[in-house]
Image: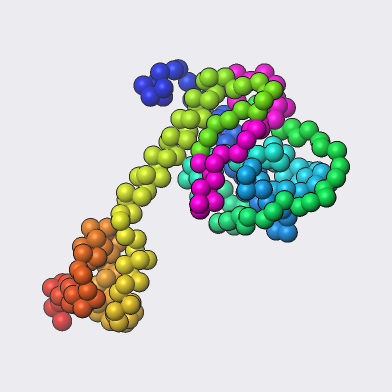
Amino acid sequence: MKDRLGIEVSKLQIKNKWDKLKEDFRAWKKLLLRQTGTGWCPIKGTIVMDDEWWKKARADIPGCGKFRKQGLQNEEELQVCFGSIISIGIDHWSPHMASAEEGQNGTNEEDTAEDAADVGQNSTNEEDTQEDASPVNENGKRAPRFIQEKGKKPKTGTALLIQEAVTSMATSASSYASKKEGKYSIDEVMGHVLAFGANYETNEYFIASELFVKKEQREMFMTFPSNELRFSWLTRKYMGKYGK
């Protein structure tokens, strides 16, 4: 961390920030389970509902109140970090872009959430919110962005650097996973095998299931310009190994 950011950060500080981000991710995913039948704001990236709905949500899901004004930031990176270790009953969720409901009344309540893990913060009940949403691209994904709400005490430099470092590590992990998978996935190339008539019980499908666990073999297979050549290549691979 010192070599990367030029600051001294203890393991406890990193652990506290990691745990805080994990709890935020868990609360956000649980909140999205309640999203059915609600409004959705594509600009702020969060659920649009009245005070009563949010009051019940905060009672059921500790820490979710902060997401009333702003959805979870850096969701893709946090998915890489915590998606496989947090179980909330779903694997994936895609927000439908619904218009905000009209006619909602009631006094706005101040949303507060515990944020003791942030380094350098003295208050344990300060809500972490942002004023504006990150830009939304054509796929509905939010780009990573760090924005502070006006009037809020900004995070300390060390806390922000730790958050950026965690995001950077998540991005690196995602990049590594992509390189390990290669240009073509196993599902994709096996789909091509089935498409040209090599059914599950054929020798060609069998040898493909052995070869295509390696990305180099998948990429070689996809270099052939026609299904006939791909089929012939698999046949020769099978004969070369098993001689039948």
**Based on the displayed image, in which of its 4 quarters is residue 92 positioned?**
bottom right
Residue at horizontal 62 percent and vertical 21 percent from the top: 154
Q: How many marks?
A: 0
> Residue 107 or 173: which is nearer the viewer?
107
Q: Which residues are magenta?
A: 118-143
> Residue 206 or 192: which is nearer the viewer?
192
Image height check: is 228 above or below 53? below
Q: Position of residue 60 (x, y in %)?
A: 76, 46
Q: Quadrant of the C terminus?
A: bottom left
Residue at horizontal 30 percent and vertical 69 percent from the top: 209
Q: Position of residue 61 (x, y in %)?
A: 72, 44
Q: Position of residue 59 (x, y in %)?
A: 78, 43
**Based on the displayed image, in which of its 4 quarters is residue 185 positioned?**
bottom left
Q: Is residue 166 magenta?
A: no
Residue at horizontal 35 percent and vertical 66 percent from the top: 188
Secondary structure, magenta segment, majority class: loop
Q: Give the farthest residue toward the right.
A: 106
Residue 123 in view of the camera = yes
